[in-house]
Structures are given as structure tokens and as C-alpha cells.
Amino acid sequence: MFDAFLQGLLMLFHVKPFMYMLIGMTIGFWVGILPGLGGGATLALMMPFIYKMTPEEAFPFLLGMHSVVQTTGDITSVLFGIPGEATTVATIIDGYQMTKKGEAGRALGAALMSSLVGAIIGAFFLALAIPIVRPLVLAFGSPEMLMITLLGLTCIATLSGRGKRGLLLGLMTGGVGFLLGLVGQDRQAGILRFTFGQLYLWNGLPIVPVVVGLFALPEIVDMAVEGTSISRNVDPNMKLGKGVWQGIKDTFIHFWLTVRCSLVGAFIGLMPGLGGGVAQWVSYAHATQSAKTAEEREGFGKGDVRGVLGPGAANNSKEGAGLIPTVAFGIPAGSGMAILMGAFFLLGIVPGPDMLTKHLALTFSMVWTICISNIIVVAVSLLFINQLAKLTFIRGSLLIPFILLLVFIGGYTANNSVGDLIVVLFAGALGYLMVRFGWPRPPFVLGFILGDLVETYLYISVTRYGFDWLYRPKVIIIFIIAVCVALYPFLQKKNLLNQEVQI
Amino acid sequence: MRRMSVKGVEHCRWQALIVCLVFLVISQAQLGMAAPYYQGKTIKLIVGYKPGGGYDRMARLVAKYLPNYLPGKPAVIIENMEGAASVIAANYIYNIAKPDGLTIGTFNRAIPFAQLTKLDGVKFDVLKYAWIGSMAVEGTVFTIRNDLPFKTAEDLLKTKSPIMVGATGPTDTSGQFPTLLREYLGLNMKLIIYPSSSDIMLAVERKEVDGRSGAYSSLKPFIDRGLVRPIIRGRVAEKGTENLPVNEDLTTNKKGKAIMNMFSAGDLIGRPFVCPPGTPAAQLNMLREAFVKVAADPAIRSDAQKAGMEVQFTSAQEIVKVIESVFKQPPEIIAEFARQAKF
């Protein structure tokens, strides 16, 4: 086992595999930065090039691309408030607020460094999990998955604003998100819901246009109205370089938070079907719970660096773990992984149990690819991050057309349809109203992502097991955890109040 | 003054040169009429599904080899236009794409059924597409988990406790095939709907469901690995499924036989490729010839084999004949079919 671990590393350090990894990374770097253009579609474009490669060369090429997309996606989220990927939305909440305060360098430093820590922890999680991975994944049936999605939904309590009013607003926006997640052809009976005769809506509202509109458009309107640059009223001569170092240091000041969020990401990545959209929000919610005083808690959403560290770490740690279902079962966990599985077959490798025994070294070389390509890309990004951060001092009137272009192109890549642009506009209007009236957007997105999953797993659990699934021990345990998570903010608040009284 | 005039003369010379050049270009362009139609052009190949699935993989294989067999070696690019089980792509190719031989589309093999059952949103007449042909035959099989005691179709049909069958929807192939087994063969089964076929396979691994039906090419890796075994197949056989019992033969119900037969039309259409209606015969014939040659290329066959697929060309004429025979069924059969297949 340890042999294979080292062998996997050595495999990567041959000239050709390493070169291919660098090429893949360069592609992934730009794919991540450009909003909308996702890792999956790019993998499909890269497929024709691997026909003549050996597996040792092809996987560094493909995975090098796929594993840095999340890292550089954070850059767009932090700098412009546009999600570079659907999975890097949570980074916006605090990251973009920091940018507005003139702390772009610090936010980027924190995002990149936590991505790096996340990638390494995710890779090691994968390496350690390999011997037990099959029973681990198989232990979670549909009823358990239902409970995990419920656990995700309880994060709404944490993501909502403070006080009774805040919680109520959070639950309401979460509910609206939940409902919008149900648009489209229902899977169980094939019934069309809220499609208004539009074929476009059959597959439901696509996630990228929704989040891009929801988060980016209100900020653009805001910037245009105020007539400032992204960084508001900050002396452009202040040293940004110091900010980057500060961000890197922040990662280590809050090291255990970063580690915990990485583990959350890795665990969620391991579960086929949950997807990266969930990991970032759960870890963001977890980060907000690390607030020790009421003022600290208020600071989240207004530019707390921990709000960047959490999702930054989880985004990357889930990548390594996300490989597991594909590698160990030959069952891809998403469209990107489905394409990767196509690559397995092309290269004459059958993904499945063999990957954990006969081809173990190759599996470990994938782990190493994720790790090393992230280290390199973070190092490269840090080199010219100051230049990137300076973009935020450009006058808004010059920058807005460029950002708008990115927003609409990003939305359009979802289905290449005019419908995408309409969704972006509607989501933008909704987002603007939500900001205007102080309704929190994170619960909305969480409800939107999880609505469909909850329905699916509830349906499967009931048709398959009747009501017997309620008595499964794991279901009961996860349910108790979910209840605790839901109640935690209230207990925490009580604690905080008590402390303040004592002070 | 003098200097100016020299400059003027130079200017004239330049003008003459430009005029000559322009003439040269135009005459070259006129010669170019004889150059192949596809020279320097780009063909857009529209796939009605997300990247990664069977339709997408086949389209990308075709895109790789097609330029070699078209005079002028055009570039071929893929555009994924997912949604509504590829009805969106079918509508686009029918109504919006220009019929100039530069757009090819591939969509759901069951798309004639969408038209037959008068599905909302269908804005095409499937017989009016400029059909190129199909690149594969996709036989449907019903598989069950290998650790279950049922060895033959008879064993399976006798079971008392319901078989849990995973499907991706009640109205696609994965749901329709087992539903027909229940309706006309009396199979005791319960349909459980999952988001994707990979979720079903994982559920099979953890013994949450007992079986699944689908295209043989998609299930082959799992059959080879010993996870599931095929028990029953549809009318259309593939290499490796010839000896399985056929669903139509196991029922005595005439209506059932007719309906199962109609479903097998989709299997024969397999991976369809079409051009927009009204594509000029010259271009269409070039494409048809090229597809035949691509399908015969040993290189694409070996690529396909590696990806677990089998290339087998079916001509446009044959496909149109199959669709016409489906459309010609008596109204009561079509009504019953529409009841089973809401699409």
C-alpha cells in the first residue's frame, strides 16, 4: 500500500506526465477564472487529445485541468463577485465584501492558501480512505442520503440573519429557493411543473445563470449607482502585497477551521449525488459558527476572512474525494466524472474494484496530481495576484461593461440559449430586491440546490422501503445530528448573551 | 511640385497593383467554385444531451473521423444542447438551423414516439428531416443483480416478492421496458426512479435495487464485471445478447406483442444523425457517403470498442421505413402505446 503511494508519486515525476500536467493546469487556470465555462465541458473538449497517450500521461493531463478549476474559480468570485464556477459561490459572500473594503489582496491570499490546504487534505483523505472506501460509500443508502440533505438544510438556520426576524426571513427565502428548485419535469411521474409551455424549463432552472444573476447583478447595479471602483474609497497607494501575506497568515491563524472545513468538503465529495454545491455552503455555515462573540457573528457577510477560508478549503478537498465513486465503482458522480470515466475506457482501464488493488499506483498518482497541480497553481497565482488585485481600483464605469460581458457569457454557457440570459436577468432582479430589503441570499441558494435532492431521496426511500427506513440506525443517528446542528445557533446565541451579561 | 508628381505616379502604381491583386483574388475565388464545398468550412454537430453520455461519446467519435472523408476536410465542432430529452435540439435542427449541410444533429432515438404521442412542445415532423443514418444499433436488455437466484426469464416471472427495478424515469426506455414486462408478462416488480443511471448502478451495488434495463452497450461493463446479468432482451439483438429470450416471444397478448415491437424501432434507430429538412441533395449525399466510410474505418471501430461501443451503420432509407411502420399502426394500438409511453 505504501509502495503504491510512493510509486504513484514517482509516476507523475517523469518528463512527459509532468509536462502534460502543466499543460492541463494552464487550461484549467483559465477555465476556472472565466465564469460559467465549467470543468466538465472542458474535459470533453480535451478527450480527443488522449487517444494516443498512456494512462500515466492522460490522467495528469485531464486531472491537472479539472483540479485547479476550483482554485482559480475563487479568484473571480473574490475579485468581481461573479462566481467563477457554480461551486465557488459561497466565497463571494465574505470575499467580495473584503474586496469592497480594499482587502482584495488579503481575501485572495486566504482563498488561494485555503484552497491549497483543502486540496492536500482532500488528497490525503482519499489516500487514507482507499482501503475502506467501498464499504464506506455503500453504507449510505438513499434514506441516509435523505438525512444528510436534511442536515444540509438545517444550515439555513446558521446562514440566516440574527434574531427572530432574521431566522424567519432565512426560512422564507430558503423556502422560495426550495420551490424554484422544483421547476421542471418531475422525475417520478414525468409531470411538468411551472414550465409554462417552455421547453427550456423542462430541465429546471440551471444553477449557473441563477447564482450569477443573484450575486453579480446587484453588485454591478450598486457600483454603477455609487460611481466608484470595486474597492470603495480606498487609497490606491496602500500596499496590497502586505494584504496577500495577511491572507496567507490568516489561513494558519484559523488553521483548525480550515482543516475542519476541508474534512466536511471531503466527506460531502465522497457521497455521490450531493455535489460541490452543497459542500461550500455547509462549510460556510460551519465557519460562521466559529464566531465567539455576537459582534464577530455580525461581521460574517460583511467581510470576515473566515467566510473565505471555509468554502475555499471545502471546494478543493471535495475534488479528491469526488474521484472515489468513479474510481472505486466505475460509477461517475457528475457529468465531469462521466467524461473522465469515458477516458478510463479509452485508455483500456476498467474503473471499479481493480483500481484499488491492481492499479493502486495509478489511483495514487491521481491523488498526487490533484495535490501537486494545486500547489503549483497557487504558487503561480500568488506571484501576480497583486496585479489582479489592482483591477479592483479601476473606475467602475470602465470595468462594468467588461464584468457584464463576463456575467452574461457565464450565464449563457449553461444551455447556450437565450433562456439563460432571461434567467440571469430575473435572478438579478430578485437578487437586487433581496439585497434592498435585507433578505439573506445564502439560504435561498441552499434551498434551491437541495430542494430537488430532498424530493428525490424522500421518494426513493418511501417507494423502496415503505416506512421501514425511518427505523434504520444510521438514519436515526444522522437525524439527531441534524437536530443538534439546527439548534446550535440558538444555544450559541444564549451562550453569547450570557457571556455579555457577565462582561 | 515635381516631388509631388513623383509621389502621384507612385500612388498610381500602388493603385494599379491593388487593382491587379483584387482581380487576382476574384478570379481565384471564381476558380474556388470548383473547390470542394466543405473546404475551409465548419460543420456544427448538435448533441441533444450533456457531455459524457452515450450520444455525446458517439458524436465526438464521429466528429474526430468525419473530416477525413468529406472533400475539403471541414472542421467539425460539437455543441451540446441538452434539455427535454433532446426535444429542444430536435426543434432547433428542424426550425432554426440553416439547411446548408453545415449543421448535423443527433438526438434521442425514441424521438419518433414523442411525435406519435403528440407530446407538447414537439415542433417537428420526424420524417421530414434530411436523414443521414444511424451509427449504432442499441439493443435493450433487462438485467438483474448477479447474487439473486433467478437464472432464467421463467424463474424471474414466477417470483412472489416484487423485484425492485431502478429507472431514470417512468417514460424513458429504462422505465418503459420493465413496465411492459409487468403489463404483458406479469412480472412482479416495483419501479424506483433515480436521478441518473449511475445512481441506479450504485443502488444495485448496495442492494437497494435488484435490476435495471437499458442499452446493452451501457450495461456491458457491469455485466462483464459480474455485478448484473442480462435476463431478457428486446427484439433487436446485439453481439452477445443473441441467445437471450425476447420480450415479445414471452407474451401471448397480441396488443402486447405489437407494442413491444413498436418500442424496438427505437433500438434500431440507435444513434441517429440528421440534417435540417431541405438540405440540398448534393451536400446530403456527401454526408451520407462520408458517414458510411467513417463507420467502415477500422480506426473508429477500435476507438469505439475501447469506449465499450459498437459502430454499426443503418442507412437513412431503412430508418425512414422503420419510422413509417411505427406511424402506420392501427389507432387502438397507438392509443394503448401512448398510454404506456407518455415520453
Image (tube, grey):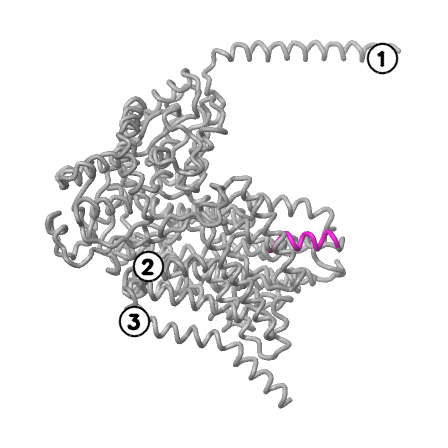
- Picture quarter with the N terminus of chain A: bottom left
What mark, if any, has residue A460 been given in the picture? 2
Secondary structure under badge 3? loop
Q: Residue A472's mark?
A: 3
Q: Which corner quadrant of the image does residue B66 belong to?
A: top left
**Chain of the residue where label 2 is placed in the rendered structure:** A
How far is the residue under mark 1 from the one under mark 2? 91 Å
Residue A7 higher or lower than B223, as above or below:
below
**Three-letter amino acid code at the position of disc 2:** Ile
**Mark 1 to mark 3: distance in Å?**
100 Å
Taking the spot 60% from the left edge, 58% from the top edge, the residue there is A78
Q: Quadrant of residue A161?
A: bottom right
**Mark in the foreground, 1 or 2:** 2
Distance of mark 3 from mark 2, alpha carbons?
A: 15 Å
| Region rendered in magenta | A215-225
Mark 3 belongs to which amino acid?
Arg
Q: Are marks 3 and 2 in contact (CB under 8 Å)?
A: no
Left or right of A472 in this view: A265: right
| Disc nearer the start of the sequence (3/2) | 2
Q: Chain of mark 3?
A: A
Q: Are marks 1 and 3 on the same chain?
A: no
Percent across and percent down for residue A198 are 49, 42
Q: Judging from the image, what secondary structure is the residue with disc 1 in?
A: helix
> What x and y, as percent, mark residue B326?
28, 30
The residue carrying mark 1 is B3
Viewer-proximal residue among A123 and B305: B305
Q: Quadrant of the C terminus of chain A?
A: bottom right
Identify which residue, A309 or A19, lies in the foreground: A309
Q: Residue at x 26, y 29 (%)?
A: B329
